[in-house]
Image (tube, helix red, strand yellow):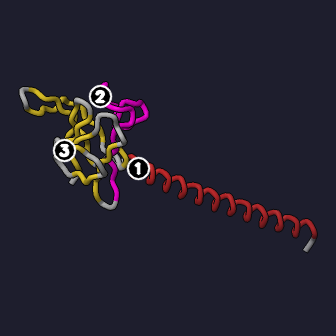
Amino acid sequence: MSTDVILFLLRLISGGLLLAILIALFVVIWREYHSAVKDAELERRVYGRLVLLRTVDAIEVATGEIYPLLPLTSLGRAPTNTVRINDTFASSEHAMVAFRSGQWWLEDRKSRNGTTLNDMPVNQPIVVTDGDLIGIGQLKFRIELEH
């Protein structure tokens, strides 16, 4: 075989190897992208909702304001909270609803006016269930969990 033929074959082989490496790199990046998208979707998944209630003639009535319940849902006046509360009796970081160990927990974040669960003060993290009422400031939220 002449030198020209050998060089041509080496070029073909190196070009094929380069193409194989690029295809493998593309496949790895594609899989990582789809994995990241799935993780982001799971993180954004809504597990229920918090329904804002108002007291009308001693009856709790839904206002129509609904907030998604995420694995970590913070409530308070600060704009960094998941649920921003426009109430002067609410602290900037008032309470947290979190999904831990297969259960939903409510925790007061050392707020100045306290948090209630079904009109009882919350002094330590406590398990919440579907239909429970969370009191923050002058507002109440009903928990509606997915089943």
Residue to which mark 1 is pinned = 43
- The residue under the point 54% across, 56% down is 32
96 horizontally vs 10: left or right: left
Q: Magenta segment range?
A: 74-100
Which residue type carries mark 3? Met
Q: What secondary structure is found at the residue carrying circle 1?
A: helix
- In the picture, the disc for residue 120 is 3
* Front residue of 1 and 51: 51
Q: Quadrant of residue 92?
A: top left
Check if residue 96 falls in the magenta segment: yes
Q: Quadrant of the N terminus?
A: bottom right
Q: What secondary structure is found at the residue carrying circle 2?
A: loop
* Front residue of 32 and 14: 32
As measured in the structure, the alpha-carbon distance from the residue carrying label 2 to the one carrying label 3 is 17 Å
* Mark before the other along the chain sequence, 2 or 1: 1
As measured in the structure, the alpha-carbon distance from the residue carrying label 2 to the one carrying label 1 is 30 Å
Residue to which mark 2 is pinned = 89
Which residue type carries mark 1? Glu
Which residue type carries mark 2? Phe
Residue 86 position within the rendered picture, expressed as x and y whole percent measured from the top left:
31, 26
- Badge 2 vs badge 3, beta-carbon distance below 8 Å: no
- The residue under the point 47% across, 50% down is 37
Q: What secondary structure is found at the residue carrying circle 3?
A: strand
Check if residue 75 falls in the magenta segment: yes
Residue 33 position within the rendered picture, expressed as x and y whole percent measured from the top left:
53, 52
* Front residue of 54 and 42: 54
* Mark before the other along the chain sequence, 2 or 3: 2
